[in-house]
Amino acid sequence: MNNVKKEDLNMQIALFRYEQIIPVLNETYPDRSALQYYKRISSTPFQYPDGTSKEFSFQTIRYWYDLYRKYGFDGLMPKIRGDKGTSRKLTKCIKEKIIKLKTDNPRMTATSVYLKLIEDGDILKKDVSLSTVSRFIASRPELNRLPVEDMRAFEMEHANDMWQLDTTYCSYITNKNGRKLRTYLIMIIDDRSRMIVGYGFFLEDNAVNVQTVLKRAIGKFGIPKRIFTDNGSPYKNEQLPIICAQLQIQISHAKVYHGNQKGKVERAFKSVKEQWMYNTDFSQFKTIDDIDKAFGIYVNQKNNSPHAALNGQTPVNVFMNDSHMIKRIDRQQLEKIFYHTVTRKVINDATIRLNTKIYETKQEYIGTRVTIKYVPDLSHVFIYENDSYIEIYEVRKVDNSRIKRKRPLFAQEEQL
């Protein structure tokens, strides 16, 4: 590894760290919790990018996760130290940094502070122990007072005032080829009535699947005034705001590390797991549709059962009490609103490129930028102009070779 440039090694180290935390970022780990995953993978040495074998504590791996969520991929890059190899204790500068870290984030543990100091190159693990940092923090009472957050329970006044959306990972199914596949449940509940208004099982946790469940829910139960989601990429992408803007839906995201803000949907997931998922043999399912049908029976029972938080009323009854206030939308219009929207410049051969595919337009569009609306699976692609949808199709070069082209006017005149 001596011939590897420092910059290349740093990139490989960042990728190594990313590979360890991506199952948690995407919730694809097979363990019962993220903490169990961290502990399991940290129980054996890792093959480090420099060719050595290294051990990392589960707290270190969890810290990489925190870095990624806060700073993105760049946060996983090793920090460069200018004084590597020199012995350092808790100098005045280090103490000041510890105070600042704890002041900026009072919930930061001593372990997290310690790892942050190592990550930033302020201390070396061999020179300063965790207990040294812990003792310093413990000696400063003002650093150990947690702020009192306003955590009051809330509830919307009417049905469809707000929907809570979230995703949870579920059991595996075995397909026809004998391959095990992780499943994901995307679910939407109405804040006021606690009614499950949307759900769907999928083999991928992505934005398109979230939008599919949202579209189904709106088609069946009307348009919510607001949706409340977490900060994951399926819920924070360029298409969802465009869709919601057309439906006049406000999007709110829970604060990072404040999953309790989505308390109702989290409790709904807990009930789903305890009442249905853990009591269901997933080996009987061969397709996602099979799971959806079985889960649909549970949802119907759940929505029509008395709920303690609703004074014994059923979610369906509470939701229907506000039926006169529900805003509906034509299904055909709804389909169009959920088309994805992008802009593209039409190049000289009258084509545009969309998701690696090339589509043919009219010659008159050459050199202009056009608005493209399309079904996410690319089954239909349109140029959107003056509220009209002009369908375009993928280029078929063989067919184009058989078309007799018109010669330019000046060429015809020369033959006269």
Image (cartoon, grey):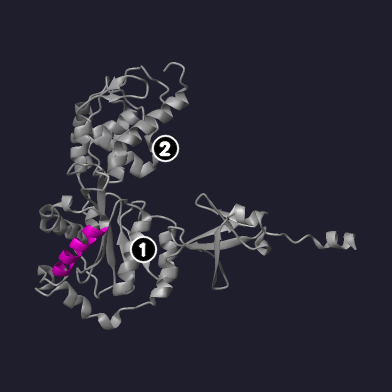
Residue 326 on image: x %, y %: 30, 79
Q: Write the start and end of the magenta stretch as one range.
A: 289-302
The Cα atoms of the two marked residues, 1 and 2, are separated by 27 Å
In what quadrant of the picture does the C terminus appear? bottom right
* Residue 87 in view here: yes
* Residue 152 in view here: no
Disc number for residue 74: 2
Q: Using the rendered view, name the quadrant where residue 165 is placed.
A: bottom left
SS at mark 1 in the image: strand
Disc number for residue 251: 1
Q: Is residue 79 above or below residue 317?
A: above
Magenta stretch: dominant secondary structure: helix
Left or right: 85, with 6 as reference point: left
Task: Characterize the local packing of mark 1: few (<14), some (14-19) or many (20 or more) Cα atoms within 10 angstroms.
Answer: some
Q: Using the rendered view, name the quadrant where residue 156 is placed.
A: bottom left
Identify which amino acid the numbered label 1 is placed on. Answer: Ile
Residue 197 on image: x %, y %: 25, 68
Q: Is residue 405 magenta?
A: no
Q: Residue at x 33, y 71 (%)?
A: 218
Q: How many marks?
A: 2
Identify which amino acid the numbered label 2 is placed on. Answer: Asp
Q: Residue at x 17, y 50 (%)?
A: 283
Q: Is residue 296 magenta?
A: yes
Residue 349 on image: x %, y %: 66, 54
Task: Characterize the local packing of mark 2: few (<14), some (14-19) or many (20 or more) Cα atoms within 10 angstroms.
Answer: few
Ranked by sequence position, the earlier of labels 1 and 2 is: 2
Left or right: 60, with 244 as reference point: left
